[in-house]
Image (tube, grey):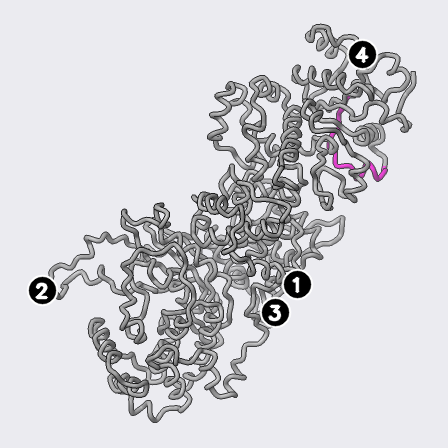
Amino acid sequence: MDNDHHLGCQAYHTRTYDTNECSSAGLPLTPCSIRIHGRFQRLIKLRHPRLCNYIDCSRSGNEDVLFVLEHGKNWLKPDKFDSSDVLKHSYQILQGLDYLHSQKIPHHCLDWNCLNISSSGDVKLANYAIHYASLGGVMVSAPIDVPRFLPPETVMSHSMAHEAPIPESDLEWSGSDHSYDVWTFGLLLLEMTFKVRLWEFLSLKQIFSKLILLFDADSDDEALLDDILRSNKIDEAFAKFDPVVQNVVRNCLKRNPANRSTCKELMTLYPESLRIKLLLTGYNVHDNKVALFEEFRQPVVEISKLPLKPLTTESFIYTRHSDEIFHLWKLAGGNLAKEMQKQGLLKQIFQICRFPNCISNDGVYLGNEFSRILKANDRIIELSIESLQSKLSSVSMDTFFPLLCFSSQSVIAAGGDFGMRCLGSNIKEVDVEYQLKRLVMFHRLIRAFPVTKKLLYKEAFTDIPAYYRNFIWAALLHVNCSATYMMKVNSMLDSIDFSVELPSDKQIDVDIPRCHQYHPLLSSPTAHGALRTVIRAWVISNPDLVYWQGLDSLAAPFVCLHFNNPALAFSCLSQFIKKYLYKFFLADNSAIIQEFLACFSQVIAFHDPELFYHLHEQNFSPNLYAMSWFLTVFAHTFPMGKIYHLWDTLILQGPSFPLFMGAAILELLRSQLLAVDFDGAILLFSDIPEIEVESIKTLSLQLSVSTPPSCLFRNWVNPDLYHTQFLPSDNLTRIQSKCSIDYPLSERQLDWCPRIHAHDVIVLIKLRDESSSGDNLIQNSEMKLSKFVIIDVRSKSEFDRGHLPESVNINYGEMMHEDEVKVIALITDQVKVEDNSLVVVMGPSNNVILCRNFTSLLIKSSYSRVCFVHGGADEFAHTNLMIVN
């Protein structure tokens, strides 16, 4: 077992509000557990050799918060402490405190129980999370400070009592915060030096009385120190001890906080030889300026530290990051609340049960002391991973070192889980063995990115593990991950002046508190601030665009995934909008949205003409229900968990893929929609029934591959895109000029079915006639259509002068005014349309109305996959495909 990778958990009971407490706006106050959960996220990114790493925060049903951290097996204790290590350990404590103070995070809970010892004998600080996360302890039900270590300014100001309602705004760092820790460190150093516990035999009430007596006296700093030493009977020993310790203590224990030295100044008082020996090299404090995948460059396993004897899978799991281990521990059935309940740390105690059994005449409480605890319990409970090790016992050692094959004929080794790969995401995400293999695989792919770009795409098409979804999305969205760019974005975010009001600020402030409020993280004030920063940065950096309602929902997934990296959240949002919502946020975006909705209507008619005609007859247009779908890419429609799974598929596809997702939703609601009228449809979409995300993903992919690329052509597509799904992955500008279908929006809105470009028709004919050919055009085609029929609606004379191979001529011009039933009967008699066949209608170049009316008739008659050639028969005049009778 690895002595440095134990998982531990702490439980704190949060304060509950009175029913009459409310915010300044008159709204109910955010529960303290949610606010702590939001503030805790910043602590997750703190990484330092002198700190125990905090990993996760969760909430229990009784408004308790549970902190998960990584720690070593051993803890520094007074009875097992070697006096020769006083200077070493105290210097390491200062290193940890100095880093926390550089991040503007005070510790405030320094005590023996937060001094963890690594396998190399170095000190790591724990328990630094609760003070910052709880706004100095005001959001927990019991004080978190160590009474015997309280500095004079705290004792004399009675700041431990928190009776006033908690403000919604976060407390700012002040210079006095570091002085609190310095005073505490000085007293702890005395205990370490002389192996005593200050005021050990005094009760809590007596300790406070003693401190008040000491601090109330009008004496200088030296006299105050002498009083503390004498009251603990260590004054003589102190005078004979190491002068370095004496000097450090004197610089810590000063009555005025402004006169106390900082941690960095205290470190200079230690011998130079010790400072050189404990110097931390190769560590970058400014982690917010690190490039996108910088943290993956260091290997998980240091080969030099591997033992010579063979490792088992049970022990080899410790070679993974502690964050990954905890993620797998939860998948293996781990439950923090149950683990803490076993240790008796999550007992709900009602206020009436905290009363003493009796009260004497002089006010002494007797009995039931445990329920009236006067300090928060910061005990760390170790989490056992035996169940995880048991579930992974059958995993081969090769899983931890997957082979990456770069040959085009090879596939990435995946441990033979091909059957597992075909299952739904909701099943794969809870399978421990499968997730371990995917975590190891993607960790290696991300470390080598962008060299492994193609392999990353290949594996992402199978599934994206939730643990690495943030970095995978960033890679798939082609985010600029250079350190220079990230520094530029961070500088831009830091320079945002919130005092300067933007036209959209009022609407943003209204929308953000309502954005995904069911989500435990997004409902916190900290998340509101992060979301506001990202949205405001996007508005400022895009002066030609404006804020539209829905942008908050669009930004929420990226803020959640990159909560501690707003620069990366902003970059992902920007890339996502450029790809899928190009020009959607113009001040006048009606043309863009109407074009998108018209294209969506054509997609519905193309794949489900019966449903399209029913909705058309009810006058139930996409404007009434699909506007929010596409403006937020379904982020306003589904909860966050479903959005992740939907976007896992979306990000791998082109900018028109949301059309297929919308069509898939309608297909899944088909039976309900066909059974209701206009009013019923309105009610149905006001509260959409539960829909399986896997069904949406599967159906939308099926619709996508069965649609000719040019049928989705839109004028408002970002010309800078170089990876699209609906156009060949060649130079986009060249392909657009070849497949351009340029006609006014007013005409598009009149067309029930989409138009197809002649280029796609030529490809279909060659795919049919020359399927065995090695022609590049055929090999590069992304169309998966194997069956199609061409109906030529021109006159017989025009048809004879030139027509496409195997096309069927129906002179619709002569029968336009005949009964529709007779026309359909004639079509059915002359044209044999197989199931799932593409129906291509070709008419004269100068008569679009003829094609429009004919295709509308086919759609009325429930013919699916109907389209007509843009430009008519003249588009094929210069090809060698036309046949003359």
| Callout 3 amino acid | Ile
| Callout 4 amino acid | Asn
Precedes in sequence: disc 1 or disc 2: 2
Residue 728 is covered by the magenta coloring: no
Please state which of residues 841 and 380 is positioned toward the viewer in this rendering.
841
Residue 780 is covered by the magenta coloring: yes
**Gap between marks 4 and 2, in whole Å?**
107 Å
Image location of residue 83, percent across then percent down: 38, 85
* Residue 355 as seen in the image, left or right of residue 150: left
Q: Which residue is mark 4?
A: 811
Is 524 drawn above or below residue 778 in the view shown?
A: below
Callout 4: helix, strand or loop?
loop
Q: Which residue is mark 1?
A: 484
Callout 2: helix, strand or loop?
loop
Image location of residue 792, percent across then percent down: 81, 17
Query: What is the crowding at mark 4: few (fewer than 14 residues within 10 Å), some, or many (at least 20)?
Result: some
**Gap between marks 3 and 2, in whole Å?**
67 Å
Is 848 drawn above or below residue 598 in the view shown?
A: above
| Quadrant of image for the C terminus | top right
Front of the two marks 1 and 2: 1
Query: What is the crowding at mark 1: few (fewer than 14 residues within 10 Å), some, or many (at least 20)?
Result: few
Residue lying at 68% horizontally and 22% vertically, measured from the top left:
750
Q: Can residue 266 be seen here?
A: yes
**Gap between marks 1 and 2, in whole Å?**
69 Å
User: Which is the main secondary structure of the residues drawn in magenta?
Assistant: loop
Image location of residue 687, percent across then percent down: 46, 30
| Callout 2 amino acid | Ser
